[in-house]
Amino acid sequence: MQKFYELKIGRVTRQLPIMKLNEELAIASFVLLGDAELTHYAAEKLAAKIDFDFDYLVTMESKGIPLAQEVCHFLKKPRYVVLRKSIKDYMKVPISVPVNAITTSAQQQLVIDGNDAALLKGKKVVIIDDVISSGGSIAAAEKLLHKIEANVVARVAILAEGDAAKRSDIQFLQKLPLFKA
């Protein structure tokens, strides 16, 4: 098995370590946190793809946060909403749904604060994330947003991993292959 995968997104290149998930599957580990150059560049390119009307970006904790921040900057949007992975003490009437993701072995949850739920009710939202792979996180986010009566108008990501690249309901900058372990 190769040790690295060279990812090219426009003018930015990264060497991603290949990590074994189980006996059959390995992934190229894409960690956006801390990579200010890539986050800024990808946000600029994703913002150019969002050429339609919407009210708020919604992202999932945690790697989507800097991306949403930068995309808001380029689109001149003053605010975005973060779906958290656990209930926090400060939350007012939190609402949650379960989520299963390819990179996490245990089941998690996505949670929205009641104040954010009220803000998004009836609004057009774009779900934004760093990578869409199995689609578990996006599906859970959509379920939660539907539950609070927000209208998902688009799903965008930097990377579409594996079969996600074949989906017609997402926009992304680059494909990311899966690997045999």
Image: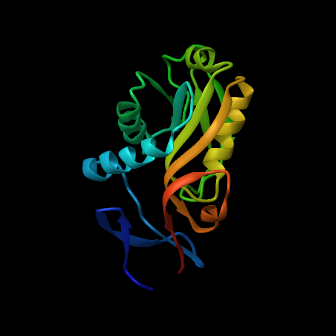
Q: Residue extending furthest front?
A: 51
Using the image, determine if residue 32 lies above or below residue 21. Answer: above
- Name the residue located 62 percent from the left edge and 41 percent from the top edge: 154
From the viewer's perspective, tell me whether residue 178 is left or right of residue 151. left
Residue 83 visible somewhere in the drawing: no
- Name the residue located 67 percent from the left edge and 56 percent from the top edge: 168
Using the image, determine if residue 172 lies above or below residue 149. Answer: below
Using the image, determine if residue 112 lies above or below residue 136. Answer: above
Q: Position of residue 117 (x, y in %)?
A: 62, 19
Residue 148 visible somewhere in the drawing: yes
Q: How many marks?
A: 0
From the viewer's perspective, tell me whether residue 144 is left or right of residue 26. right
- Name the residue located 38 percent from the left edge and 44 percent from the top edge: 43
Q: Quadrant of the N terminus?
A: bottom left
Q: Position of residue 91 (x, y in %)?
A: 53, 18
- Name the residue located 57 percent from the left edge and 36 percent from the top edge: 126
From the viewer's perspective, tell me whether residue 125 is left or right of residue 81. right
Q: Position of residue 125 (x, y in %)?
A: 60, 30
Specify the color scheme: rainbow
- Image quarter of residue 74: top left
Using the image, determine if residue 55 lies above or below residue 49. Answer: above
Q: Residue extending furthest bottom?
A: 1
117 vs 173, nearest the viewer: 173
Q: Position of residue 21 (x, y in %)?
A: 53, 69
- Image quarter of residue 71: top left
